Image (cartoon, rainbow, N blue to C red):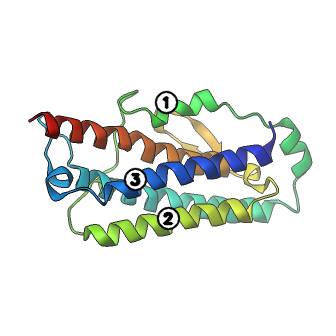
Amino acid sequence: MDIFRLIQDIKAHLKLSFGEVDRWFEKDKDTLNYKPSHGGWTVRQILEHIYLTNFYLLILIEKGAKKAMRNAPDLDLESEIRNYSFNKEYFEKVGEYGAFEWIRPEHMEPKGEIELSKIRNLITQQYHQCMRYLDLMKKGQGLLYKTMMTVNELGKINVYEYIYFLSLHAQRHLTQMENNERERLKN
């Protein structure tokens, strides 16, 4: 796997998924506050959940990036790059809404306490934070540290994969928001 191609692919995925999330902030109040018939979250709640999940994932990504950069002088980066293979299909299910049961921690549940405009600004900052980490680890250093990911039994994943996971999580909820809007328009 060309690690530099992977970094570019993750950047492109982040740009696309965060750009699509950002467009949801422009929706009318009826769409943002529509409660789906199955009792799921409103678009507004989903946007808050994306922010909260990113917040906690970025704590782990920041720690992982720092540890990866600290590991760089002591580990054989060239060997890690040569021996790395990215199993994209293994991760793709994360981006599919309803592909598996996902039990999120309570601290990632939306509470409705943050203004929508603030959530939008925070998500934009989170996007830039992800891009900075990718720029910081531009030579492949993100391979040098792994953190456990229990969602969908992914196991230990490197820092690049964690960032990709964050982007896939947003993609997953884009489908959910589209479903809400479709249902609202039918009613």
Q: Contact (CB < 8 A) between labels 2 and 3?
A: no
| Helix, strand or loop at mark 1 | helix
Local packing at callout 3 (Cα closer than 10 Å; few below 14, some 14-19, many 20+) is many
Q: Mark 1 points at which residue?
A: 93
The mark found on residue 13 in the picture is: none
Cα–Cα gap, marks 1 and 2: 22 Å
Mark 3: which amino acid?
A: Val
Q: Which of labels 2 and 3 is toward the front?
A: 3
**For the residues carrying marks 1 and 3, which lies nearer the camera in this image?**
3
Vertical side of 145 occupied by 93: above or below: above
Name the one closer to the observer, 40 or 185.
Answer: 185
Left or right side of 72 for 130: left
Which quarter of the picture shows residue 157?
top right
- Residue 79 is left or right of residue 115, and the answer is right
Looking at the image, tell me whether mark 2 or mark 3 is earlier in sequence order: 3
Q: Residues within 10 Å of mark 1 (few under 14, many from 20)?
A: some
Q: Which residue shows up at 58% across the image and 61% down it?
A: 130
Q: Which disc is residue 126 wearing?
A: 2
Going 59% across and 28% down the picture, which residue do you hit? 90
Q: Is residue 59 left or right of residue 67?
A: left
Image x and y of residue 28, in percent: 20, 57
> Which element type, helix, strand or loop, lies under badge 3?
helix
Q: Residues within 10 Å of mark 2 (few under 14, many from 20)?
A: some
Task: List x then y, in percent, for residue 100.
Answer: 39, 28
Q: Position of residue 94 (x, y in %)?
A: 48, 35
Mark 1 or 2 closer to N-term?
1
| Amino acid on which disc 2 is placed | Gln
Q: Between 113 and 135, which is closer to the camera in this rendering?
A: 135
Secondary structure state at the residue bearing disc 2: helix
Q: Name the residue under label 3.
A: 21
